[in-house]
């Protein structure tokens, strides 16, 4: 009656992996946009904005994602705000992502030599174009390796969505382990799938890093 | 919610646990299957609505119910006094003897012997507080996330014995370890109940009636025999400290 | 250029004071620069030369005093800064070319974003100025592919593309290898011939002799001496100027 | 929703929570120290001239970085008994977190070493120093300083991630909190308290790390 | 020093060739340096000056030819490199002080690790050499707290602490502000008076006139001219030398 871990079970894991990918993309796009805003706030010339974004980063970097998700999904309803799973996941993962990316990108923006934005100012170029045309393209290249390694962590971090009942990769693995009672095989397969999702990214990151080093 | 509201919606959202072989699990085709699933389907059939399963875990099932994400639970969840303070139980629909399994050479005959060994248990299940209650204070307890890891801890020798469901035996035998490990003793009865939100009186009445009727006509006995492989015990309709009427 | 014809004021600094925290780096600076005048600013390291010229296009805020460029006042909060920056070009010691843009794109960016010039027009003008600094054939390269001297000439062309009335130079040759200094100085001399207003921080005394109308010596945030180059070199009025000249000319 | 908050059962359990905090700190700080040490070894292997060593190091680093720590803990705890090594939950957790931390630390520190200008190494060589001495006395401190912020945030992440090792019954903060949860069902209160404790821990940890940084890695730079 | 007394060879390079990949940067270099001789090496950027002196203490490998220092041959795989480096001190353009060590620790490190000197002895010697370059009062500071000129003097003291018989200087003043050049040149001149063997890459022609026994001009990896300073400046034998001198002396 107990199932053996075989091909069908592996396909079930792959189905879970689909959600892992969807969740990661979601978190990355929404969180990335928010993270850019946070990074710009952290480097703005207004002290208040800098303080607010600094506090934001502190809180969302300083607590485990698990607890953030728990609060958005189970906590907000207590305030009378009932949230859908996907809304909750989007909010929770985006808060988490934006705090980390905000901090990474703040660093990259500040790593662009001051002379660059001074030269743009001296040419009369305003804030928006100074950022879009001069600073961000350079910051982007500086921050890319760190961004990708965060993305890899994010992909693995989406496993926590299981708390909200979403059967993504890790949760599929748990379910399979509880059906087949062969946890080592199941989790080995889970690790393999994560590896296949993540490795292209780390490979890209290494290549980009090499190219940047060569350009110097 | 009330049964009428569910009928109006056309779908019942039911929380079921899918990591509890053979109570609830995912079959070869990726479909939900098991004892609980069949019962849940039976309920929706009587309501004349579609069923939507929400896969719950030991950790999130109570918040999910309390917050209204699911209409009610058909979990393999033990009825305990503590939980009854937070959610409303329906009268028991199945039972699952709580059993200690251990290495052949572990000398465990009763609760008092547990103190000499390292005992594993599924955290978040009802087995955990029970173990704390019955075992001597000096017992070394190791807690794991789910049944699979708990059993695995026994099989890999990380613990000497585990306390949990009688169905662990199925697993131990089928993974080819029946020679090394054995059933030690039955710790307690374990009555399992569906649950609704506190205050959902009509829903409670409907489900109480459902369980009573199908105990009467033998449908539940049949399902139990089919999935668990033994006869369903005679189940009580009252338990000390737990209110099944929603009136108290 | 005849000195009497320079009646028109391009830049006027009146009682300018600037602090970095507790550090008083510009002390009551008064300076008037006529249209077409070429000024060389020199002085020891840390004397405030860079800060002075950076105030003129509001890369630094001033805390006291007033600065007028072409008759427009630069407010302390940077009011009119954008307006003034269109008239004032700047060339930095470290070139500060945009590394992710080609030479041509470097010269087109501000025209497109600030003046909203069409692509064709911006390219035309960029090419004209690149030719002028003898570097048009490198237009498609990236800054990192050029030598220091070439990069600095691109920086000059980039500033010229905005048709500035004033050019500020902050030690434009001091990051260059000795051999490349000359090509940049030559470019600057050719600009001077055009009659553009220039303020140049430099220790290239040959350049000062060749093109400056006035040499200004600063020390510890003050203008100590301001004189025509002949007078400045042959007969400095202050002890400190003399000591400084002794240091930089004698090895 | 009319949920009435009741923190009494949570506060009543403070000795347990305190034990959990100690467990979290003990396991994560040990893993940081061992992980950094092991990471430096992997970093040197990765940067060495021997292709064999390099391949081993790259393989290790990529394997660890691209798989979840949960799975790594599982393998150490459930897998190693198969080869005769039986570790307690806590030992398994420390080992897995060390292995995990080492992979990240290796990459971070490598960035630091690469940021050291070659002139520094040349100056050491010109003074007649050996490679090992050059690394030990000239390269390491500035290299670690260059990446110290990144290293610190990795450590904090490690501390936060240690919540995952509760799955092999390593007794840290989340383990006790979840046990408490299954006994009291005060989920919101427990998770709220847990969030506050983790936030406080990460603040304290980052303060301690930056203090260490100020003592060991601070020297004036331009 | 009398030229005839320098019969003893300290450095001998025989038919040295070096490639960076396909780039042939040193071509059949033959060079003999007598004990106590001071050589100034100059030439255009990229001509191989740095590479030449870096080969002498094996910071670069050579592919052909032989190098002897104090009679010991430096093998192509760096055999004897450690031995030779103890006799050869080097001062870099970018100073390359260790930023995490104080000035004193910078001077003590190699003594302790290479010569295994005791702490007290190492400190004594470090302080002696720091005094000699007039910077003993800064011993407890970190490099970043010093000016460029001071840093370079520390770098010189650091090299001297190893009691080298030869000192190599690679453009030691070209990263310095104009005002600080003099203090470093003065230090180097005082070394020259001591009779130490020196090879110095520099474009400071005043320095060459003051202390060099020989000025060597390199171009594209070859030694083009080698002459006493008077002859070198007044009457260079080659067209290329003349053109080069014209460039660096005339602005
Ligand atoms: N952003 C800043 N914050 C604090 N102090 C500064 C800043 N910029 C410059 N200073 C200080 O202001 C003083 C004047 O600096 P400035 O750069 O104007 O000098 P300078 O004459 O251009 O020197 P140099 O020849 O070295 O370029 C110096 O003491 C410098 O340390
Ligand atoms: N590590 C290297 N790899 C490849 N090519 C190099 C390397 N170092 C130097 N070169 C090349 O070798 C040639 C000689 O370089 P070298 O640094 O010796 O010149 P130099 O005379 O010291 O010039 P400069 O005055 O600019 O310091 C140059 O063409 C340079 O680009
Ligand atoms: Mg300056
Ligand atoms: Mg060189």
Image (tube, coloured by chain):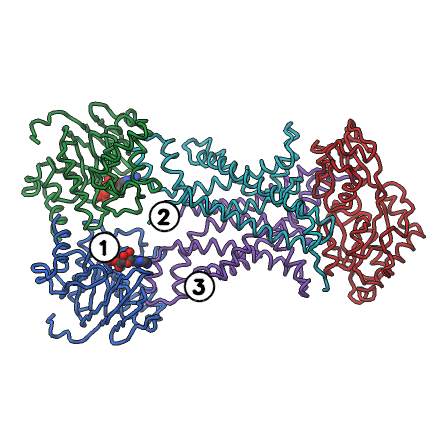
Chain colours: A purple, B red, C blue, D cyan, E green
Q: Are marks 2 and 3 in contact (CB under 8 Å)?
A: no
Dot 1, crowdedness within 10 Å: few (<14), some or many (≥20)?
Answer: some
Quick check: D164 left or right of E95? right
Tell me how far mark 3 sits from mark 1, CA to CA: 32 Å
Viewer-proximal residue among B136 and D95: B136
Residue on which disc 1 sits:
C45
| Cα distance in 3D space between marks 2 and 3 | 36 Å
Q: Is residue E103 shown above or below E62? A: below
Ligand 2 in which quarter: top left
Pick the front one: D125 or B171: D125
Give the CA distance from mark 1 to mark 2: 33 Å
Chain of the residue on which disc 1 is drawn = C
Residue at position x 22%, y 27% in the image: E67
User: Badge 3: how crowded within 10 Å, few (<14), some, or many (20+)?
Assistant: few
Residue at the spot x=22%, y=72% of the render? Answer: C12
**In the figure, residue E151 lies in which quadrant?**
top left
Same chain under badges 2 and 3? The reply is yes
Q: Which label's residue is closer to the chain start, 2 or 3?
A: 3
Provide the residue designation for mark 3: A47
Q: Can residue E187 be seen in this snapshot?
A: yes
């Amino acid at each position: 009656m107990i199932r053996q871990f075989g091909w069908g079970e592996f396909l079930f894991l792959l189905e879970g992996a689909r959600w892992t990918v969807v969740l990661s993309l979601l978190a990355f796009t929404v969180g990335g946009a928010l993270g850019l805003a946070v990074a710009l706030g952290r480097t703005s010339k207004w002290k208040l904005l800098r303080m607010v974004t600094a506090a934001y980063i502190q809180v969302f970097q300083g607590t485990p994602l698990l607890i953030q998700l728990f609060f958005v999904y189970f906590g907000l309803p207590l305030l009378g705000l009932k949230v859908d799973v996907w809304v909750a996941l989007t909010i929770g993962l985006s808060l988490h992502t934006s705090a980390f990316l905000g901090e990474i990108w703040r660093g990259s923006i500040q790593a662009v030599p001051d002379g660059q934005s001074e030269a743009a100012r001296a040419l009369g170029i305003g804030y928006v174009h100074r950022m879009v045309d001069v600073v961000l393209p350079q910051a982007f290249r500086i921050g890319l390796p760190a961004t990708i390694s965060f993305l890899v962590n994010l992909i693995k971090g989406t496993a926590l969505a299981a708390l909200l009942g979403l059967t993504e990769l890790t949760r599929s693995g748990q379910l399979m382990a509880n059906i087949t009672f062969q946890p080592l095989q199941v989790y080995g397969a889970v690790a393999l799938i994560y590896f296949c999702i993540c490795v292209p990214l780390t490979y890209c990151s290494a290549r980009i890093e090499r190219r940047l080093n060569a350009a110097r | 919610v009330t049964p009428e509201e569910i009928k109006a919606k056309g779908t019942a959202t039911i929380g079921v646990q899918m990591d509890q072989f053979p109570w609830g699990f995912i079959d070869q085709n990726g479909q939900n299957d098991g004892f609980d699933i069949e019962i849940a389907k039976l309920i929706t059939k009587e309501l004349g609505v579609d069923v939507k399963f929400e896969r719950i875990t030991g950790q999130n099932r109570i918040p999910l119910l309390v917050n209204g994400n699911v209409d009610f639970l058909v979990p393999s969840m033990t009825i305990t006094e503590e939980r009854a303070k937070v959610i409303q139980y329906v009268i028991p629909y199945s039972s699952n003897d709580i059993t200690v399994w251990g290495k052949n050479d572990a000398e465990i005959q009763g609760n008092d012997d547990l103190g000499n060994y390292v005992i594993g248990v599924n955290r978040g299940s009802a087995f955990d507080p029970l173990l704390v209650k019955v075992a001597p204070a000096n017992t070394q307890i190791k807690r794991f996330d789910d049944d699979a890891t708990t059993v695995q801890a026994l099989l890999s020798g990380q613990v000497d014995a585990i306390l949990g469901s009688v169905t662990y035996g199925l697993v131990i035998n089928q993974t080819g370890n029946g020679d090394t490990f054995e059933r030690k003793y039955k710790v307690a009865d374990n009555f399992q109940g569906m649950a609704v939100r506190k205050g959902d009186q009509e829903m409670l009445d409907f489900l109480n009636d459902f369980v009573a009727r199908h105990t009467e006509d033998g449908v539940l006995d049949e399902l139990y025999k089919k999935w668990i492989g033994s006869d369903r015990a005679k189940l009580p309709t009252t338990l000390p400290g737990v209110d099944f009427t929603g009136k108290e | 250029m005849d000195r009497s014809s320079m009646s028109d004021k391009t830049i006027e600094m009146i009682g300018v004071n600037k602090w970095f925290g507790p550090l008083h780096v510009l002390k009551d600076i008064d300076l008037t620069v006529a249209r077409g005048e070429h000024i060389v600013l020199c002085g020891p390291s840390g004397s405030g030369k860079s800060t002075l010229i950076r105030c003129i296009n509001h890369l630094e805020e001033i805390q006291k005093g007033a600065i007028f460029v072409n008759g427009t006042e630069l407010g302390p909060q940077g009011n009119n800064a954008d307006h003034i920056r269109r008239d004032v070009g700047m060339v930095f010691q470290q070139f500060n070319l945009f590394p992710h843009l080609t030479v041509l794109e470097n010269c087109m960016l501000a025209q497109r974003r600030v003046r909203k010039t069409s692509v064709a027009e911006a390219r035309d003008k960029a090419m004209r100025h690149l030719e002028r600094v003898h570097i048009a054939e490198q237009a498609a390269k990236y800054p990192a592919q050029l030598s220091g001297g070439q990069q600095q000439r691109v920086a000059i062309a980039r500033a010229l593309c905005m048709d500035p009335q004033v050019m500020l130079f902050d030690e434009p040759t001091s990051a260059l290898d000795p051999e490349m200094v000359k090509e940049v100085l030559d470019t600057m001399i050719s600009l001077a011939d055009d009659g553009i207003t220039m303020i140049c921080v430099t220790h290239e005394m040959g350049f000062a002799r060749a093109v400056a109308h006035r040499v200004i010596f600063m020390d510890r945030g003050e203008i100590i001496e301001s004189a025509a180059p002949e007078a400045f070199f042959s007969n400095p009025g202050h002890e400190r100027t003399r000591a400084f000249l002794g240091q930089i000319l004698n090895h | 929703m009319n949920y009435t908050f009741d923190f009494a059962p949570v506060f009543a359990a403070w000795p347990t929570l305190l034990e959990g905090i100690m467990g979290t700190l003990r396991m994560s700080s040990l893993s940081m120290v061992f992980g950094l040490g092991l990471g430096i070894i992997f970093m040197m292997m990765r940067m060495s001239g021997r292709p064999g060593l390099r391949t081993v190091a790259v393989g290790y680093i990529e394997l660890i970085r691209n798989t979840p720590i949960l799975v790594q803990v599982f393998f150490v705890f459930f897998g190693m008994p198969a080869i005769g090594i039986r570790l307690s939950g806590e030992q398994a957790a420390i080992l897995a977190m060390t292995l995990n931390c080492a992979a990240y630390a290796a990459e971070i520190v490598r960035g630091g070493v690469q940021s050291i200008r070659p002139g520094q190494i040349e100056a050491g060589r010109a003074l007649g120093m050996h490679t090992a001495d050059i690394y030990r006395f000239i390269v390491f401190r500035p290299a670690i300083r260059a990446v110290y912020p990144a290293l610190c945030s990795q450590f904090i992440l490690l501390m936060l991630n240690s919540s995952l090792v509760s799955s092999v019954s390593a007794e840290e903060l989340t383990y006790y909190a979840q046990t408490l949860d299954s006994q009291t069902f005060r989920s919101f209160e427990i998770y709220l308290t847990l969030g506050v404790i983790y936030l406080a821990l990460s603040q304290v940890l980052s303060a301690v790390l930056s203090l260490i940084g100020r003592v060991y890695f601070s020297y004036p730079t331009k």
